[in-house]
Amino acid sequence: MTESQSSIPKDKLMWMYETMVLIRRFEEQAKREADSGRILGTHSAIGEEATPTGICVHLDDNDYVLGNHRSHHHCIAKGVDINEMMAELLGKVTGTNRGKGGTMHIADATKGMLGANGVVGSNIPVATGCALAAKIQGRDNVSVVFFGDGASSQGSLHEAMNLASIWSLPVLFVCENNRYAESTPFEYAIAGQSVANRAAGYGMPGVTVDGQNVIEVYEVAEEAVARARKGDGPTLIEAFTYRYHGHFGADNPLGYRTPEEQKHYKDKDCIKTMEQFLIESGTASKNKLEAIDNDAVQRVEKATQFAIESAYPDPSELLSDVYVKYP
Ligand SMILES: Cc1ncc(C[n+]2csc(CCOP(=O)(O)OP(=O)(O)O)c2C)c(N)n1
Ligand SMILES: [Mg+2]
């Protein structure tokens, strides 16, 4: 254990472990729901739990998170209720979006989770706009947008980074580089082989981090969030991570990557690494960690039961909550 690792308060270490385990158990259930046909599909974030967890631990409900098509882990790390999330996946009226958003549009403004989004790259300018609003209104909250390596080549990121930098906006651009955009390897698609290096062109810090190591993510995010809150502007973080499953349910990842590569990343599993750290540093016992896992399993079972027992939205509600009327 290094000195900086031991300086993280115990409650935060435990919160990070609990959050990653809850995400893992939720995602396993979401996959079962998709495999059984009860929901049409899902983009699994299994393997990627550490990045939003190590970042959202620094945020509160007044801070904003914007996600992408693979966002269950962002939502849970930001504190969205898993009963409402599961109900949303099943299209039920008790869901976060009253059953009309589904897996790719989960949002809960009360928690500062302003929405997942199926259009790749589209939430990056939205996060930048939220940061601009906070700055104009003199609030000290920050905006975080999560996007993939594929999205990093969209023009929206480059326009947003430029504006965020010239206006010194409180925003974190977080690229979850899981090495593939569908089946396209990032080594093929990203000129210069680095997303983080692109920050230099926009006059902001660009940092890389092992996205499988929640403590390292914690440390990088701590600095970036402090910088944003102080009014010193944005940071681009490139977190190297890995999705254990295919791009979506029907995708077989062995069509474009090897079993050896998959094993390499699974051996660095973020939950196992954290488990080992908590036990070796004397922060928690094995029994305590097992109890946390059992609790997560039960919470997910309850959420699934809640979702199954909930009603579908009434057809008369088809158009309500769909558009927002501005004054
Ligand atoms: C504008 C747009 N183009 C294409 C797609 C289809 N699409 C959905 S996800 C995806 C790949 C995104 O890859 P990445 O940004 O790396 O995220 P990951 O799936 O790896 O988490 C694509 C091309 C889309 N949804 N929106
Ligand atoms: Mg990707």
Image (cartoon, rainbow, N blue to C red):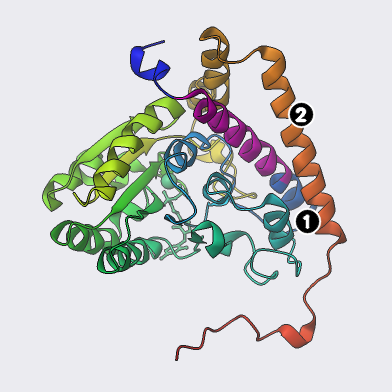
Asked if residue 174 is positioned above or below residue 51 in the image, the reply reads below
Query: How far across and how far down the image is residue 118, in percent?
Result: 50, 63
Task: Please identify the dominant SS of the magenta region.
Answer: helix
Indicate whether residue 19 is drawn in magenta: yes
Query: How far across and how far down the image is residue 1, in percent?
Result: 42, 10
Measured in 3D between alpha carbons, the distance from the residue under mark 2 to the one under mark 1, in whole angstroms, is: 26 Å
The residue shown at (75%, 61%) is 90
**Residue that extends furthest to the bottom in the rendered view of this protein:** 327
Name the residue that disc number 2 marks: 294
Helix, strand or loop status at disc 1? loop
293 horizontally vs 130: left or right = right
The residue shown at (49%, 25%) is 265
Asked if residue 258 is positioned above or below residue 134 in the image, the reply reads above
The residue shown at (59%, 36%) is 19
Task: Compare marks 2 and 1 and give the one earlier in the sequence.
Answer: 1
The quadrant in which residue 193 appears is top left
Viewer-proximal residue, 194 or 159? 159
Query: How far across and how far down the image is residue 107, in percent?
Result: 56, 63
What's under tag 2, amino acid-wise? Asn
**Residue that extends furthest to the right in the rendered view of this protein:** 309
Helix, strand or loop status at disc 2? helix
Query: How far across and how far down the image is residue 286, in percent?
Result: 67, 13
73 horizontally vs 129: left or right = right
Q: Is mark 2 within 8 Å of ligand 1?
A: no
The quarter of the rendered structure image containing the C terminus is bottom left
Viewer-proximal residue, 37 or 196? 196
Q: Which residues are magenta?
A: 9-29
Query: Of circles 2 and 1, which is in front?
Result: 2
From this viewpoint, is residue 110 visible? yes
Name the residue that disc number 1 marks: 37
